[in-house]
Amino acid sequence: MDLGLIAQYLANGIMLGTMYALVAVGFTLFFGVLDVIKFSHGDVLMLGTFAGFTVWLGLQAAGIVNPWLQLVIILIASMAFTAAIGAMIAKWLVLPLKKAPPLNTLLLTLMLGTAIREAVRLFYPNGSNPKAFPALLPSASIDLGGFLLRADSVILVAAGLSLIAGLNLVLNRTRLGLAIRAVAQDEETARTMGINYMLVVLATFAIGSGVAAFAGIMNGLYYSEINFGMGLLLGLIGFSAAIVGGLGNLYGAILGGFIFAGLQVVGAALLPFASAYKDVFAFAVVIAIMAWKPTGLIPERTSDRV
Amino acid sequence: MSDIAIDAPARPKGLLPGAATILAVSVYGWALLTAEEDWQVIGLLVLAAAVGLVGKLAGLGPKVLASWSSNEATMNGGAVLGLLAVIFALSTQHFPLLMLTTTLLYFIASLGLNIQFGYTGMVNFAGAAFFGAGAYTAAVLGGYAWIPPLLTILAGGVVAMVLSLLLVYPIVRTTGHYAAVVTIAFGVLFKTFLEVNEILGGPQGLMVESMKLPGWDFNNGPVLFGVEMSFYLNYALFATALVALIFCLVRRLERSWLGLHMDAVRLDETAAACFGISVHRTKILAFLSGNFILGIAGALYGMMISFIAPASFTFSDSLLMVSIVLLGGMGSPWGGALAAAIVVLLPEKLQVLQEYRFLLFSVLVMLVLLFRPDGLLPRQIRNYFPGREGGK
């Protein structure tokens, strides 16, 4: 295998890994503050991407055609929209079930995901067909000895990684981040210390969902296509990545995202006769990792109270 | 669930409330299955809601329950008779019989999932995968004429069980969300594998041979009293027998010490382990036996619809099965029957809703989770002495 091809696989893996990590970060944040899995995350992502697409249509109609301006407006609009949706889901659907068994929350959000997916398919104009997502990034590329480094990929990966870094800063260096970590560690103590619990939970859900919308737009720009079902697989992968890395841990989610992307790429590269099996391979390895490390690669530091 | 014990009346009830319920449900089922127009179906649904409301206000529910639990064997026999009566009343119509049989098969599947979700408290989001494993087994083995089809059905269950053996190790080591991801990953893996595997027909799927018993070809409509019946009548009768058999087995399992172990493991794993219950063994038993039942149901389903494709065994279908268990009530076998009927029949009967099916069910399940988390027919408190009330 020549170097160019390896570089191509590598670039692809980094791209996918960044995207998966962005989704997984949401799962791990939600689990941190509320100990719940919000499975509708992938579909909220899809909703955010469709919102971005709708805004783009509106911008086109309004005559604003500068791609950079469009991109910024789309990103802000879809992230804000998705953040609001995420906070609303937390307030009206997840928090009321706080005392119920965790399975109920998982099921509720699974069903919510289905509902969102179906609603977009049925009620978005022509929603059951894939939509061509506009190419807003420059299409230039550099030839590096048989390997085309595309400018849009570089920009996407750089933006994604800096978003993750920014999130890390927010969590570790700001008062809000301190509050989120405090609630994640011990909700009752955090409350008695005067932390506004509801506000922190809603803020966490808003942040996680907004980050997912970014991943969705990234996905749309990379594949130049969006459809109503894109959230399901992305959500599944993000969930698997968060679990493989270890729930409740930001680095675990990032690690898990890149591991999953790596598995897919390795699967595609090693099984050239059957690259269609790459997802089978990746999910099989996920099951194997779960058997080996039942609480993820970076386990939560908690102990069961009996 | 403790409030049910207080509600239990002191003296045994007669047969009347239970028998009346069976009669009413049979007539209602027949009416719903034969209703053709949307307004008839909607009328019947409004009627059901009204009867449910009046029954609740008049306190009929506990009476029926008491009557049922005092004469359980008779009542279950009566339910089978009612089902047979409906089947014979529909015996010349293809579509209603197909609907009814599909409901029965989903009911069987919900019984299998119930062992996992309801009794043991394990999650399984790959129900459709094990169902599909049974169906694909039937498709592959159907190609060999010398294998008796009855054995094929068993083989469907065995293959589903063997596949679940692959998951046993990760399943017993993980709990909660981590176990959920194992089954979800397996469900996606299974469907993707079927789609890309050329030998198993790829995305186009496979043809399945129909069911044959010695001297009884299920593809020919039987002729009774000079009238040719629908060939689905064969499947409906066979599915009824299978439902009766598996229902009895699951009820026995629930009542046995194994069922007690399962309940203990669900309620508190640590405490169960302290009392000497092997948590791993109980979970393995629940996982394997539940998937065995799913595989059997899948095999018969494949034979009945005679054509299967990976698109019928997706993650959404697994979710549909989970929502049957949840809608009916965790650990409540009869709830599974009611929910299977709602989930299968409603979208087929209301053609208006066909398109909105998944949306409707997801919203319905969300409402149940938020406002009635025990399901439509919640599980009753364990009755140690059949025929007596509330464990007295």
Image (spheres, rainbow, N blue to C red):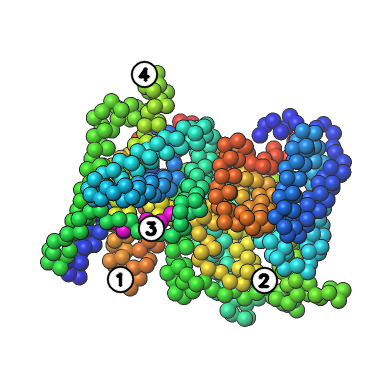
Instruction: Give percent across and percent down for residue A263.
Output: 31, 58
Of callouts 4 and 1, the N-terminal one = 4
Magenta range is A222-228
- Left or right, residue A296 beside residue B278: left
Neighbor class of circle 3 (other Cα within 10 Å; few <14, some 14-19, many 20+) is some
The span from disc 2 to disc 4 (Cα, nearest Å) is 67 Å
Query: How far across and how far down the image is residue B16, in percent?
Result: 87, 43
What's the CA distance linking mark 2 and mark 3? 48 Å
Q: How far apart are marks 3 and 4 (CA)?
A: 49 Å
Q: Which mark is residue B150?
A: 2
- Name the amino acid, label 4: Met
Say which amino acid is labelled 1.
Pro
- Residue B388, given in percent of the width and then of the height, sits at 80, 38
Q: Does residue B237 show up?
A: yes
Q: Numbered disc 1: what chain?
A: A
Q: Is mark 2 on a helix, strand or loop?
A: helix
- Nearer-the-camera pick, B132 or A148: A148
Q: Do labels 2 and 4 share a chain?
A: no
Q: What element carries label 3?
A: strand
Label number found at residue A193: 4
Disc 3 from disc 1: Cα separation: 30 Å
Q: Which of marks 3 and 4 is in front?
A: 3
Towards the viewer: B274 or A13 = A13
Query: Does residue A125 appear to the left or right of A25 in the view shown?
Result: right
Front position among marks 3 and 1: 3
Q: In the image, which disc is placed on residue A272?
A: 1
Q: Mark 3 points at which residue?
A: A131
The answer to whether residue B169 shows anywhere in this view is no
Closest to the observer, A24 or A119: A119
Say whether residue A225 is magenta.
Answer: yes
Check disc 3 and give the amino acid type. Lys
